[in-house]
Structures are given as C-alpha cells and as structure tokens.
Amino acid sequence: MKRLGVILLAAFAVVSGQQTRADDKGTGDVMKAEQAFNDALTKGDQKEFDSLTSDDYILTSSIGTIWDKQRNAQAIGQGDLKLDTINNEDAKVRIYGDTAVVTGLSKIKGKFKDHAIDDSYRWTRVWVQHNGKWVCVAEQLSRVIPPSDATKPKDK
C-alpha cells in the first residue's frame, strides 16, 4: 500500500509538473491571444477571429446554444454581434503541454441583433498550440445572475 502511495504521488508530480506557473512565457503568450480574441470581438474583426480560432472551434453560449466557427464569424462579420466593451477580471491560465485552459469573469456591454448585452459572464476557453500559435478550440459562457433579495444571506 505504501508503494502505491509513492507511485500515485510520483504520478501527481509528473502531471502537476506539466502545469505552467503564472510567470512562465507560455502563460503570457496565451494571455496575449486572449487579448487579441477580445479585441477581435470588440472591433468586429472577422479575419482576426478566424485566425485565433481552430476550424472546429465551438462556443456554448450562456443560454446553452451551440455556435460553430462559421456561425460566430458570420455574426461578427455581419454586425449581428457588436460588443462595445469586454472588461476581464480574475483570468487564470493553466497550461498542460500544448493545451491551455483559461477561466475568468468578464463584464460585457454591446448587443446581439436588437438585444442589449450588459451583464457579467464567467467563462472558460480552451486553447491549443498549432504550428507555434495559440488557437481557441472551445469556449463556454455562463451569465452571472446577481442574487435577489430573497436569496441574500440575512444579517444577524
């Protein structure tokens, strides 16, 4: 049993050793790709969005709909999706070899067609290195719903 514990500890050390620390160059490169991704969305730059996403990129929206790369790029290019600001907070990068998982919180203002967007979203993006460049392969958004008075803890 002691030997199994040593093996598991060694395996954990190998796996956790693949994770990049926050000050490593890879993390900075991923965060630059994140910023370029957000800039492409706020500038409505379909070409830049294309270059930052894989051909099989997929978005799971905050309402559970699935958007592939073509549908997302089309919404950006046609101006259906117009984001004025994306203010990121709490972004964390974890790198595992050629894959990075980025999580964060964003305050987003803009519109989708005739619907105003002015909400906070928790998100996860998965990036992979392809030909020396980070490209986004998947992302998922969850709208942050402020607690109502009924669900807030009461002061004692």
Image (cartoon, grey):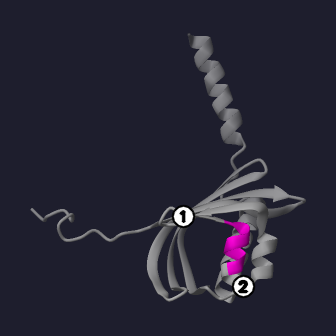
Report, in whole angstroms, how far the alpha carbon at label 2 lies from the one at label 1.
Answer: 19 Å
* Disc 2 element: helix
Near-viewer residue (29 or 43): 43
Tell me what residue is drawn at x 72 percent, y 62 percent.
57
Looking at the image, can residue 20 be seen? Answer: yes
Identify the mark at residue 77; answer none if there is no mark: 2
Left or right for 54, reference 91: right
Callout 1: 10 Å neighbours few (<14), some, many (20+)? few
Residue 133 falls within the magenta-colored stretch: no
Residue lying at the far top in this picture: please name it. Answer: 1
Quarter of the picture containing the N terminus is top right
Residue where numbered disc 1 is placed = 65
Residue lying at the far right in this picture: please name it. Answer: 131
Near-viewer residue (112 or 6): 112
Q: Quadrant of residue 156?
A: bottom left
Tell me what residue is drawn at x 55 percent, y 86 percent.
113
Identify whether 150 is placed above or below 97: below
Q: Which residues are magenta?
A: 68-74
Amino acid, disc 1: Thr
Residue 70 falls within the magenta-colored stretch: yes
Tell me what residue is drawn at x 50 percent, y 85 percent.
109
Q: Disc count in the image?
A: 2
Q: Quadrant of residue 23?
A: bottom right
- How far across and how far down the image is residue 131, in percent? 90, 59
Amino acid, disc 2: Gly
Identify the mark at residue 9; answer none if there is no mark: none
Identify whether 70 is placed above or below 18: below
Magenta stretch, main secondary structure, is helix
